[in-house]
Image: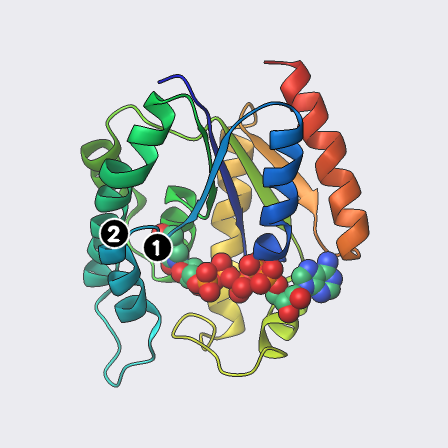
């Protein structure tokens, strides 16, 4: 693998998507070619699976079915987009990746983390993110931001306790993998978050 995998994570409405283009442009200014993508999604099949996952549905969805769909979309994404891009020397900038499965399906839904680890090993082999930018914003602030956009998806309609469990797993993983996680204070203005991203990215690039 010649390129690098950079993932962006956080709770609902943390402001990740708002900053994706900024991060891509920053990396491109530094001379890297960047493929910007997202999960679940990033391929035609992945986007269809995304629609199934996000659409509110009567009767809900079994946590194991939800997790397997996340990994089905991920397997396609890795095969069609991520691995070819990395092999060709591109950097891949992905809005959410497997840390989100640990946080949402593991933390939020209560699925045993070991089962997620089995799927991760199966679908990804050795592939793990080189850098994960974790957007830290109080759960209620993020939900209020997401709520201002109008209609809520299947995840956004979960209760506060669900998102507290999601965040607890993100925090746990950031402590477990300090070499790749960088925490961004996303509670500030869009401009302040940008400034912090620039500082963090510059420092991380220097260390490579
Ligand atoms: N999921 C995903 C799993 O359960 N398991 C998995 O394995 C994976 C990969 C994806 C859902 O799937 C789940 C997690 C998610 O629930 P999504 O719509 O992509 O669905 O969900 P999010 O990634 O959470 O997208 P959001 O749009 O909700 O959050 P973002 O991207 O963090 O926030 P953003 O940038 O869209 O901003 C939200 C609003 O806040 C404003 C923006 O203008 C926007 O209106 N905003 C700010 N306001 C004030 N100050 C700032 N600094 C702001 N930054 C943005």
**Mark 1 or 2 closer to N-term?**
1
Q: Quadrant of ligand 1?
A: bottom right
Q: Position of residue 170 (x, y in %)?
A: 51, 46
Provide residue 153's location: percent of width, then percent of height: 42, 75
Residue annotated with mark 1: 40
Residue 13 seen in the figure? no
Residue drawn at x 44%, y 74% is 158
Using the numbered discs, state the Cα–Cα distance from disc 1 to disc 2 in whole angstroms: 6 Å
The quadrant of the image that shows the N terminus is: top left
Q: In this view, does 69 lie to the left or right of 93?
A: left
Query: Considering only vertical position in the picture, is 54 above or below 69?
Result: below
Q: How is the image coloured?
A: rainbow
Residue beneath the point at 22% across and 37% down: 79
Residue 73: mark: 2
Q: Quadrant of residue 109?
A: bottom left
- Looking at the rendered structure, the secondary structure element under dot 1 is loop
Q: Is label 1 within 8 A of ligand 1 (CB to nearest ligand atom)?
A: yes
The answer to which of 82 and 118 lies nearer the viewer is: 82
């Amino acid at each position: 693998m010649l390129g690098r995998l950079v993932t962006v994570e956080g709770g609902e409405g943390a402001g990740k998507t708002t900053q994706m283009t900024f991060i891509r442009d920053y990396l491109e200014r530094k001379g890297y070619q960047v493929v910007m993508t997202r999960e679940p999604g990033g391929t035609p099949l992945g986007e269809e699976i995304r629609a199934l996952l996000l659409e509110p549905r009567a009767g809900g969805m079994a946590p194991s079915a939800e997790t397997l769909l996340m990994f089905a979309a991920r397997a396609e994404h890795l095969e069609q987009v991520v691995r070819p891009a990395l092999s060709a020397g591109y950097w891949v900038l992905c809005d959410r990746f497997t840390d989100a499965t640990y946080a949402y399906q593991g933390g939020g839904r209560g699925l045993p983390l070991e089962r997620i680890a089995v799927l991760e090993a199966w679908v990804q082999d050795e592939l793990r993110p080189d850098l994960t930018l974790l957007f830290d914003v109080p759960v209620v602030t993020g939900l209020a931001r997401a709520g201002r956009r109008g209609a809520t998806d299947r995840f956004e309609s979960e209760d506060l306790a669900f998102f507290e469990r999601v965040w607890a797993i993100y925090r746990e993983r950031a402590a477990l993998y300090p070499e790749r996680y960088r925490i961004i204070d996303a509670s500030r203005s869009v401009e302040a978050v940008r400034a912090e991203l620039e500082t963090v990215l510059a420092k991380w690039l220097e260390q490579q």
